[in-house]
Protein backbone atom coordinates (compact mmCIF):
# COMPACT_ATOMS: atom_id res chain seq x y z
CA UNK A 1 0.00 0.00 0.00
CA UNK A 2 2.86 2.37 0.75
CA UNK A 3 4.40 1.69 -2.64
CA UNK A 4 1.18 2.69 -4.35
CA UNK A 5 0.94 5.84 -2.25
CA UNK A 6 4.51 6.91 -3.04
CA UNK A 7 3.99 6.07 -6.70
CA UNK A 8 0.88 8.25 -6.82
CA UNK A 9 2.72 11.12 -5.13
CA UNK A 10 5.59 10.84 -7.60
CA UNK A 11 3.09 10.69 -10.45
CA UNK A 12 1.42 13.87 -9.22
CA UNK A 13 4.78 15.62 -8.88
CA UNK A 14 5.66 14.43 -12.39
CA UNK A 15 2.41 15.80 -13.82
CA UNK A 16 2.85 19.03 -11.88
CA UNK A 17 6.00 19.72 -13.89
CA UNK A 18 3.93 19.94 -17.06
CA UNK A 19 1.70 23.01 -17.46
CA UNK A 20 -0.34 21.39 -20.22
CA UNK A 21 -2.02 19.01 -17.80
CA UNK A 22 -5.68 20.08 -17.39
CA UNK A 23 -6.81 21.22 -13.97
CA UNK A 24 -9.54 18.57 -13.69
CA UNK A 25 -6.77 15.99 -13.65
CA UNK A 26 -5.56 17.38 -10.33
CA UNK A 27 -9.03 17.48 -8.83
CA UNK A 28 -9.47 13.80 -9.69
CA UNK A 29 -6.03 12.92 -8.32
CA UNK A 30 -6.66 14.89 -5.13
CA UNK A 31 -9.97 13.09 -4.69
CA UNK A 32 -8.27 9.73 -5.15
CA UNK A 33 -5.52 10.71 -2.72
CA UNK A 34 -8.02 11.85 -0.12
CA UNK A 35 -9.82 8.53 -0.48
CA UNK A 36 -6.72 6.31 -0.41
CA UNK A 37 -4.92 8.13 2.40
Image: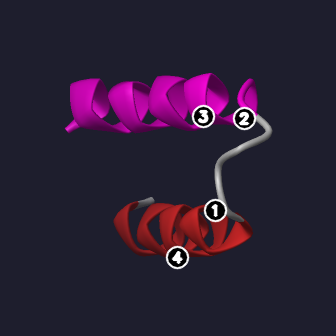
Label 1, secondary structure: give it: helix
**Residue 31 x %, y %:** 52, 76
Helix, strand or loop for the magenta stretch, by majority: helix
Mark 3 vs 4, N-terminal side: 3
Mark 4 vs 2, N-terminal side: 2
Q: Which residue is painted at 65% across and 28% down in the image? A: 13
Give the residue pinned by disc 1. 26
Whether label 3 touches label 1, CB < 8 Å = yes
Mark 3 vs 1, N-terminal side: 3
Q: CA distance from mark 3 to mark 4?
A: 16 Å
Residue 16: image tag: 2
**Residue 30 x %, y %:** 59, 66
Q: CA distance from mark 1 to mark 4?
A: 8 Å
Q: Which residue is painted at 71% across and 30% down in the image? A: 18
Label 2, secondary structure: give it: helix
Residue 15: image tag: 3
**Residue 27 x %, y %:** 63, 74
Q: CA distance from mark 2 to mark 3?
A: 4 Å
Residue segment shown in magenta: 1-18
Q: Nearer the viewer, residue 13 or 18?
A: 18
Whether label 3 touches label 4, CB < 8 Å = no
Position of 23 compared to 27: left or right? right
Whether label 2 touches label 3, CB < 8 Å = yes
Whether label 4 touches label 2, CB < 8 Å = no
Q: CA distance from mark 3 to mark 1?
A: 9 Å
Label 4, secondary structure: give it: helix
Give the residue pinned by disc 4. 31
Whether label 2 touches label 1, CB < 8 Å = yes
Amino acid sequence: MRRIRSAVLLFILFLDAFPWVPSWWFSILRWLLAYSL
